[in-house]
Image (spheres, rainbow, N blue to C red):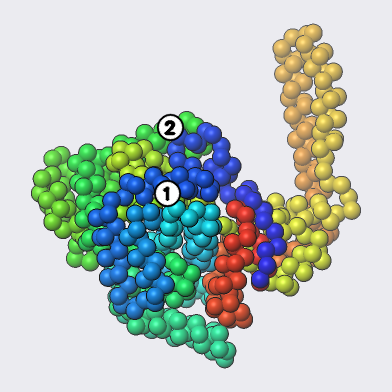
Amino acid sequence: MKLIESLGYHKGVYSPLMQQLLQNDSSLNPFHNGLVSIPAATRAASKRAASFDQSKRNTLVNLLHKQYKHLDPDAKTCTQIDALLAPNAVTITTGHQLNIFTGPLYFWYKILDVINLAARIQDADNKHQYVPVFWMASEDHDFEEINHFFLGEQKIRWEATASGAVGRMSTTGLETVLKTLTPYCTGTDQGKELLALFSECYLQEDTLANATRRLVHQLFGAHGIVVIDGDDTALKSLFAPVLQAEVSKNITQTAVHKTNNSLKKSIKGFKPQVNPRAINVFYLFDNKRLRITKDEEDFGTTENPDAWTLQSLCEEIQKYPERFSPNALMRPLYQECVLPNIAYVGGGGELAYWLQLKTAFEAFDIPYPLLQHRNTVLLMSKKQVKKCNKLHLPIADLFLPTAAFINKRVRQISDIDIDFSSQRELLKDNFKAFYHLASLTDKSFLGAVEAQEKKQLKGLDKLENRLLKAQRKKLQDEVVRATDIRNDLFPNDRLQERTAHFSAFVLDAGLANFTNELKATLSNASNGLAIIQI
């Protein structure tokens, strides 16, 4: 496995907002505390370590040992957990949904990036301890997003009835997924290893949260990752004052609306990733996750509109914090409240809503972390790389939208120049004389000149498109060869990392080799889009 190319923040992959953020556009400075760098991380570590009191550390370490007990963790994992007791220890965190059998590949890239980032900062700073953390989104309730993964074009799906927090779901029924997976993995030692991994994690654990913890531990535990489940009474007790403030004063909605308005003024075309509600808290009851609502002075849920007064609701939060769950907007606040965290590693969608939250963090007096965009990765076989080289096909072009990719390819291989830019410039130069003449007469003639120029420019556009279409037809065989490569690498015209499953790559390499080599290769990649030959 080797890094072929780093393409930075490619426009075909990163949204305009993310490009602005990752290139340190000063217009976004009011909405975050900076991106990760060694100096910024060491400063943040000093500040966060000093502000995170020892009682919180004790609570955190005790519950982590409790959550890991069913795994019989090795000495390294116990050492990583116990490190958090030290007053100089901080965390670097990523998080994800509980996709069965990891789901798409970017699940891996997130975790390996946070492991590599913690190690890189640790090498540069011996004054603090940096612990990489994976936060399980166990309280998410969108089962349809996590109940499947793809093997090639085959969708492997867990058929189950789900409601409430997915981490609490029973793993009953996942043996049918194993049966579906088995035909793809028989006949090789690597395939048997995958089946054993699935069986150990999902058939020997009782809940999806426990199964996911075991899976992440088995895959990445040797590299120092610590897995945490926020659906925990002890942790939520630490967060209870924030929940009480939220239901009492609608702090998140007020703060995020203010930030959204500022973002709309600063960023052209900005659209909020997440919109706040009046109360951004759910109630976990009877295996359901119910939104809390307010009607005049009384509070309730979507199924029981007259459950509490404000006083009784605050008392319920204090007495039974495990019954309350922050929504997507408040989850980052919860995470940063209970961890000595200095940085969050996430994808573009995640970082977009983190930008909406800085004012809310300030309103709740919770430290806001540094941000780091995870690596985007394209894995290519030697055969695919060889084909690209043979066709003189730049890998960067593969990330263009389909139509733009085909048109650019036709222009590249055509023996006819299909770029009419020089003709357009010549036409514009010729019309300058008409504009001068129009300035000496009246406005009606000026309008006629403008209309004629637009008409002729539009005519050139049509001629160029006709020529492009004709050449596309003439060069169809060459275009098909290029698009076949692209289709292999972008299933269903989506980024490989959002659909492809790790099993497609480990059946040859083996699980340990794939993990170790991918980690090592990503550690050498610069931030942005990495092209890796496997």
Q: Write down the quadrant of residue 58 in the picture.
A: bottom left
Who is closer to the viewer here, 450 or 29?
A: 29
Q: At label 2, which amino acid type do we have?
A: Ser
Q: Is 175 on the left-hand or right-hand side of 473?
A: left
> In the image, residue 366 lies at what x, y percent?
32, 44
Helix, strand or loop at label 2? It is helix
> In the image, residue 185 lies at what x, y percent?
53, 85
Q: Is residue 153 visible?
A: no
Q: What numbered label is drawn on residue 262? A: 2
Q: At label 1, which amino acid type do we have?
A: Ala
Who is closer to the viewer here, 515 or 481?
A: 515
Q: Is 325 on the left-hand or right-hand side of 125?
A: left
- Screen quadrant of the N terminus: bottom right
Name the residue at 34% across, 79% down.
72
Q: What numbered label is drawn on residue 45? A: 1
| Mark 1: few/some/many CA within 10 Å (<14, 14-19, 20+) | many
Q: Is 96 on the left-hand or right-hand side of 209?
A: right
What is the C-alpha distance between the residues marked 1 and 2?
29 Å
> In the image, residue 237 lies at what x, y percent?
21, 55
